[in-house]
Amino acid sequence: MSITVHVPAGLHACCDRSSDLSLSVPSVRAALEELERGHPSTYRSICDETGAVRRHVNLFVNTSHIRDREGLDTALAPGDVLTILPAVSGG
Amino acid sequence: MPERVILTIGTKKGLFVAEAPKTRGRFALRGPFGSGVSVYSALIDTRGKPRLYASSCNPFFGMKVLRSTDLGKTFKETASAPAFPKDDGRALANIWSLAAGDGRNDLWCGVEPASLFRSPDGGDSWEMVQGISNHDHARKWQPGNGGLCLHTIIRDGNRVHLGISTGGHYLSDDGGKSFTASNKGVGAGFAPDPYPEFGQCVHKIARHKDAPGRLYMQNHGGWADWTGPGGPRPDIGVLRSDDHGRSWRSIAKGLPSDFGFPMVVHPHDADTIYVVPLTPATRTCPDSAPAVWRSEDGGGAWKRLAKGLPKKDSFFTVLRDGMDVDELKSPALYFGTTTGQLWIGRDGGEKWDCLFDSLPPINCVKVAVV
């Protein structure tokens, strides 16, 4: 049983045009590590070279922002959806 | 295939490519590539089969390098972009300069925070150049309004010149292994010491390839009226060096302002240079009437070139990489504006026409005949 990583349209080109990736990982941190191994361009778009999530990228587990859970240590259960979303912009 | 003039136009909303026959009558536009994302630097690499490179600076998803092998009909992201080592503590914030190196696939890249990277394989892998990126001064440089950027890379054999804002001019005599601040005569207006060892807000450095010892600099001028510590410092904005950048002197006399961003050298005459003087407070042309200014004697005297440009009510900025000149027998100048216009100045800037009137705000313009 795995979790789903939902990738925004702006990053589809980084992961073979996929909008959803399936991973078997126990936490958000492990999901990012798996992305770094399997989809390095996607990973670089989410995290900078220090390993920090980019300032204008938000990560949600189901409907909760990871900052309201345990950050990168937020646990993932089978069936969870990890959504990558760019912060709102415009004006 | 007949030779063509290729322009890369880096904008706030992606890269455009314009192409024309050598007559430069009508330019066909394609793009944007990297749509919606700012492009601050581009390179038309004419070594062998031409390749185009552009930085794609995404505030959400980070920096990419785009590469085209079909003269800008399509672009693909290179395998990686410059990145600081994981334990460095710095993170790439922008890509400001792309330059050709020695080998066929060797690239140099200046970034923000001010650091230098090299690629041996056309941008697929990158290595940080320690000599400047971890220079003793590197953690003391301050960002200017545009960020802490390494924006100019000029190479002449083992001699390498770098322009950093705000860091100043750095010179290497050993191919980039080590660098020395080389700012004698380069003024700074935003520090009590008018001539510090380093920390100047250099905007652009240029030189003619056949006169490598002669360099021209557009520095951050506009400090003639300063009344604080250190006193006024007029004419520090437009400078010349005749000793490979070891010392610099003002050539600003005769210009309406010593503030500006781009500095361009004529392709066939090392004495002929072009600047775009701007009013310091607004970064727009004096009296709202845009003009390029030309010197044909290395900065001794200046002439205003404005035929065809708006005579009034024009308030754009031309940024540091916003102007270039082609290498045809009678070269044309090109500049892009922050209001999205791309101008061509035929006959070395004697007569100006607007090629494109409604592009996104323009960051950088490069031209090559291929």
Image: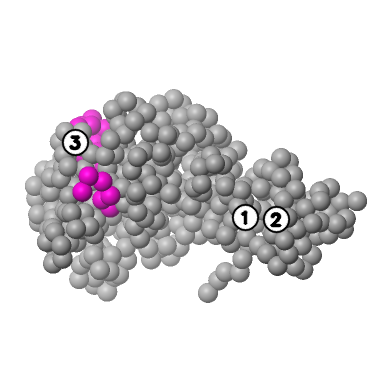
Segment colored magenta? B196-215
Q: Secondary structure at mark 2?
A: helix
Instruction: Find the distance from the CA under tag 1 to the CA under tag 2.
Output: 9 Å
Q: Which residue is mark 2?
A: A72
Residue B304 x, y percent position in the rendering: 16, 57
B199 in the magenta segment: yes
Within-10-Å neighbours for mark 1: few <14, some 14–19, many 20+: some
Q: Which residue is mark 3?
A: B246
Q: Are marks 1 and 3 on the same chain?
A: no
Q: Is residue B135 above or below residue B148?
A: above
Give yes or no for contact between labels 1 and 2 (Cβ–Cβ under 8 Å).
yes
Within-10-Å neighbours for mark 2: few <14, some 14–19, many 20+: some
Magenta highlight: main SS: loop
Q: Secondary structure at mark 3?
A: loop
Instruction: Find the distance from the CA under tag 1 to the CA under tag 3.
Output: 43 Å
Tell me the residue at 67%/48% (across/down).
Answer: A42
Tell me the residue at 38%/47% (across/down).
Answer: B139
Q: Which residue is mark 1?
A: A53
Looking at the rendered structure, the kind of residue marked 3 is: Arg
Residue B40 x, y percent position in the rendering: 43, 52
Give yes or no for contact between labels 1 and 3 (Cβ–Cβ under 8 Å).
no
- Residue positioned most to the right: A1
Instruction: Find the distance from the CA under tag 3 to the CA under tag 2.
Output: 50 Å
Looking at the rendered structure, the kind of residue marked 1 is: Val
Q: Quadrant of the C terminus of chain B?
A: top left
Between circles 3 and 2, the one closer to the viewer is 2
Tell me the residue at 21%/54% (across/down).
Answer: B188
Looking at the rendered structure, the kind of residue marked 2 is: Leu
Mark nearer the N terminus (1 vs 2) = 1
Q: Are marks 3 and 2 on the same chain?
A: no
